[in-house]
Amino acid sequence: MGKKVTIRDIASMAGVSVTTVSQVLNGKGKRFSKSTREKILKLRDQYQYVPDFHARSLIMKENINTIGVLVPNVSEPFFGTFVEGVQQVAREEKLIPLIFSANRDPKLEKEYLEQMVERSIDGLIIASARMTTEMINQALIRRDIPYILFDRNYDQEGARVQTDDYHGGQLAAKHLVDLGHQKFLFLGVNNITENFKQRLAGFKDVLEENGRQFDEDKDVLRTDLSRLGGYHAAKAVAQSGATAVFTANDDVAMGLLRGLRELNIRVPEDISVIGYDDIALDEYVYPRLTTIHQPIFDLGIGATKILLDRINNNNDHEKVEKFPVRLVKRESTAPYHMV
Amino acid sequence: MGKKVTIRDIASMAGVSVTTVSQVLNGKGKRFSKSTREKILKLRDQYQYVPDFHARSLIMKENINTIGVLVPNVSEPFFGTFVEGVQQVAREEKLIPLIFSANRDPKLEKEYLEQMVERSIDGLIIASARMTTEMINQALIRRDIPYILFDRNYDQEGARVQTDDYHGGQLAAKHLVDLGHQKFLFLGVNNITENFKQRLAGFKDVLEENGRQFDEDKDVLRTDLSRLGGYHAAKAVAQSGATAVFTANDDVAMGLLRGLRELNIRVPEDISVIGYDDIALDEYVYPRLTTIHQPIFDLGIGATKILLDRINNNNDHEKVEKFPVRLVKRESTAPYHMV
DNA sequence: GTGAAAGCGCTAACAC
DNA sequence: GTGTTAGCGCTTTCAC
């Protein structure tokens, strides 16, 4: 209903100037009389005056602390957890996180990125496979907006948080080899990005070091990076003859579990499945999923902290923080039995 | 590094006035010579000029399409899907959705709400149990920002989308009664809100209509509204002697499924479990979860469309759009067998 | 103790 | 065809 109450309205009602109101409301009004101050405060409360954000940030180059978070999809458990980590730090540091979920649509990503730039946010956390450094810089060029890269951005510049995907792949292979398996499969994704390549490389290397056969042409299957993708791949997995499958991530593994179940193939008795990420859901599927743990929540925290660091200290050197991965043994993997 | 390029910079470099630049860049420059236009466009590209958002929205009170979405937690599958629905409409309508996830913290919710108001967004979608109409109005008062309420806001004013929770409860009871069960349990939540009350009421009424016993004191258990909550409740559920359990939502049901499994209680052979919501995960747990379907994605779409309607047409009457619920039979419920 | 005035970057009447 | 001017709502010198 009501038109917006401006500082001018308050001023004229209080019978003082806008300066006075501004000063008082910003806690810089020690020099004004008590009665003036109280009058203004009272009017503020009465009319629910809130200074206009845009007018304010137009002047104050130092922004209200706002950071942008660009993720492919908040509804994926992985990114949901990541965002929660970001939020935790944001809360502690009184930052406002603007979350943009672009559904892996490059056009949208670009658009959102530009939006954030326009809104002159203080910093940016970008989690996106498709987004190249070039694209990012193009949008950010000539603005010194610090940003942090996350996930799948290996060959890129810029401060970032990373996990050791190669090592993750090694761990998965080692676990499966220890269980005595002989025939392996990597259930990868159609749109392969560097982190997946690394996992595969680590996986393959350990297999070969242990004298196992692994042919990248025949022993790698590709599907969509989703539960449905894993589900649809079940038949091909079953026909491959492999007894141990390493999936691109836990979502894919969950889909595979379902698909295998419908095919009456038992996990882990017939096939062992190991995922990647360690999302919270892993404990709730059946069988509980063995996986490579990534500290997703901590990654969110870490990314935000590095970003803050860069914002505040204008820390220009490219900081790359590595986070550890580890094997989490649950029920979806078991020793290999000869048939 | 570079300072921000302003319209003035572009103007002086092009040797024209700011007006000219502004007009040309906003597509209102038909009256200018082609050479001028091209010169400006080229400079814009060269210097990656982006008009300052704040300066712009300071003037054009109306036009930047931004809506705020306040949810308890994006990483919950339910809200994740809801947000996706919102985003779909947003994309179609060229809106920018600002997502705020407040983790059910009332203080944060209020803070975010105020933030959105300050940023003069065009409209608001609020999904929050704790948030009373009073709180909302307090933050929104004297601004005519239209908003839509979602989820758990029964006894409240304002346009909103709703599903028929009472009917949902009825459907659950009917299904269980049809299967021949005699002893029932409602696994509810500690912090009961109106939607849960409605579900319970519908559940109870149908049970009693069919001559089944249901005592709200003894046959209702309370736990946290989460997978972990359901998990922890498993023992109590097992000891209750009930053969059919209706849970507050699917998350709780998933936790219960896991807990029961660890107790070696078979679902559905020993106990039937029916959830609520029909989140995507239901197909991937074991056994696949029977549930009451809510059109979560459509709710997101619907909420956004109603909001748009109110923004554009200044539609002041309180529109309440109801969405249907229905039973989705899967594998977690089965006929009752005498022991 | 208080206020006038300048200006943040932009758009839009209204000249010329 | 193009420029002048007047703000949008606010903060901040600096003068009184």
Image: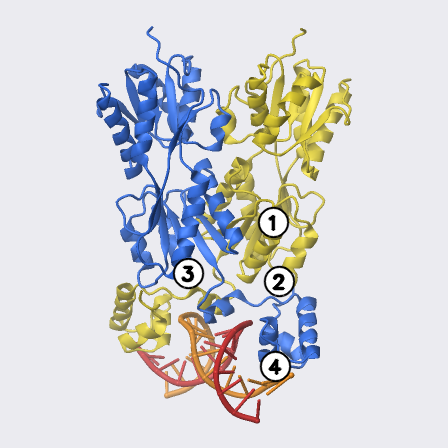
Chain colours: A blue, B yellow, C orange, D red
Residue identifier under label 4: A17
CA gap, disc 1 to disc 3? 37 Å
Q: Assign a secondary structure to mark 4.
A: loop
Judged by depth in the image, the label closer to the viewer, 3 or 2, is 3
Q: Which mark is residue B148?
A: 1
The relative height of residue B151 versus residue B133 in the rendered view (above or below) is above
The image shows residue A240 at horizontal and vertical percentages of 29, 16
Label 1 packing within 10 angstroms: few (<14), some (14-19), many (20+): many
Left or right: A4 in relation to A282: right
CA gap, disc 4 to disc 1? 38 Å
Q: Give residue A145's quadrant in the image.
A: bottom left
The relative height of residue A88 versus residue A217 in the rendered view (above or below) is below
CA gap, disc 2 to disc 4? 24 Å
Which residue is located at x 70 percent, y 47 percent?
A: B156
Q: Which mark is residue A312?
A: 3
Is circle 3 on the same chain as circle 4?
yes
Q: Is residue A188 visible?
A: no
Left or right: A41 in relation to A100: right
Relative depth, front residue between B122 and B317: B122
Q: Assign a secondary structure to mark 2.
A: loop
| Chain assignment, label 4 | A
Judged by depth in the image, the label closer to the viewer, 1 or 3, is 3
Q: Assign a secondary structure to mark 3.
A: helix
The image shows residue A69 at horizontal and vertical percentages of 43, 50
Q: Quadrant of the C terminus of chain A?
A: top left
Amino acid type, mark 4: Ser
Is circle 3 on the same chain as circle 2?
no
CA gap, disc 1 to disc 2? 15 Å
Q: Is residue B217 visible?
A: yes
